Image: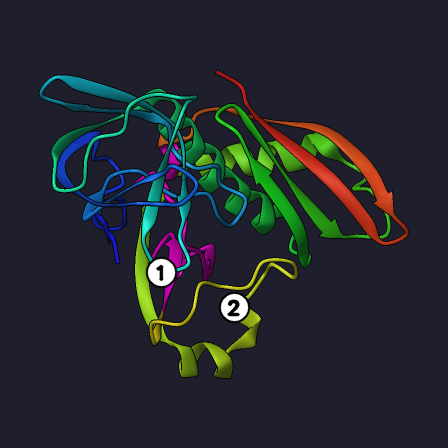
Amino acid sequence: MTQALFRDDPYLRDGEAQVVAHTPEGGVVLDRTVFYPAGGGQPGDSGRLDWPGGAMEVATAVKTEEGGIALVPAGPQGLPPVGQRVTQRLDWARRHGHMRVHTALHLLSVVIPLPVTGGAITARKGRLDFDMPDAPENKDMLDAALNDLVDRDLPVREDWISDAELAANPGLIRTMSVAPPRGTGKVRLVRIGQGAEQVDLQPCGGTHVARTGEIGRLRLGKIEKKGRRNRRVYLHLDD
């Protein structure tokens, strides 16, 4: 298992670690990492590893079958040997974009309160697919509602519940296509707002900003028909 440092602090940009394995595909597994592995529609992080006498550009991070996180090199290059101490350096601008967009998509699921059938995140925009037979009639109203949630600068926090508690509260699950991360006996919930100001609570394993005000201005993009009951809604960072 790789210790997921990004889980405790998504704002970590670098960190020391030790190489514990190489994957058959040529990835590097560390004992602890700041790199988020691809999952739940959020891309894996990129950056680099440095060690005395060497360096490796990291194209992405992925989960391994053994519960580790493998850092995938950007093209053929030398790997740090097993046992080597390395310094991890995250491409922070890209990761922070993912955090802003991911939290913004949670807000999109608030202003369009329908089941989500899919989604994807980049550093500047994202999209959600909704079980929605007809397109929204007033995009301007949705734009205003989204940016109002940003302007309220709501706190974004995490809570944990057991697998059994989640099974007893299936209404917490918004996504129909991606199962909440389970298997450890507990499930992470992301909460936006608190008390009477709470607007969202749902299972999520991704990285998020600390407050909605950090997202910045948002703009709805295209709304595409992707099936009889499916609409794809694009959302852009507008700054």
Residue density around tag 2, few if under 14, some if 14–19, many if 20 or more, within 10 Å: some
Nearer-the-camera pick, 43 or 206 = 43
Residue type (three-letter) at the residue carrying disc 1 = Glu
Contact between marks 2 and 1 (CB within 8 A): the answer is: no
Quadrant in the picture for residue 152 = top left
Task: Work out whether residue 91 can be spotted.
Answer: yes
Q: How many marks?
A: 2
Residue type (three-letter) at the residue carrying disc 2 = Leu
Left or right, residue 167 beside residue 160: right
Left or right, residue 27 beside residue 168: left
Task: Work out whether residue 151 can be spotted.
Answer: no
Q: Secondary structure at mark 2?
A: helix
Q: Residue at x 22, y 29 (%)?
A: 13
> Quadrant where the N terminus lies?
bottom left
Nearer-the-camera pick, 136 or 148 = 136
Quadrant in the picture for residue 85 = top left
Q: Residue at x 27, y 29 (%)?
A: 79
Residue 71 in the image: state x and y as whole percent.
34, 37
- Tell me the mark number nearer the camera, choosing from 2 and 1: 1
Work out whether mark 2 precedes mark 1 in sequence or the reverse, and give the earlier one. 1
Residue 114 in the image: state x and y as whole percent.
68, 57
Left or right, residue 178 beside residue 194: right
Question: How are the residues colored?
Answer: rainbow
Q: What segment carries the magenta color?
A: 187-213
Q: Which residue is mark 1?
A: 66
Q: Which residue is mark 2?
A: 172
Nearer-the-camera pick, 83 or 50 = 83
> Farthest residue in the right direction?
228
Magenta residue check for 15: no
Residue density around tag 1, few if under 14, some if 14–19, many if 20 or more, within 10 Å: few
Residue 73 in the image: state x and y as whole percent.
37, 28
Residue 163 in the image: state x and y as whole percent.
41, 78
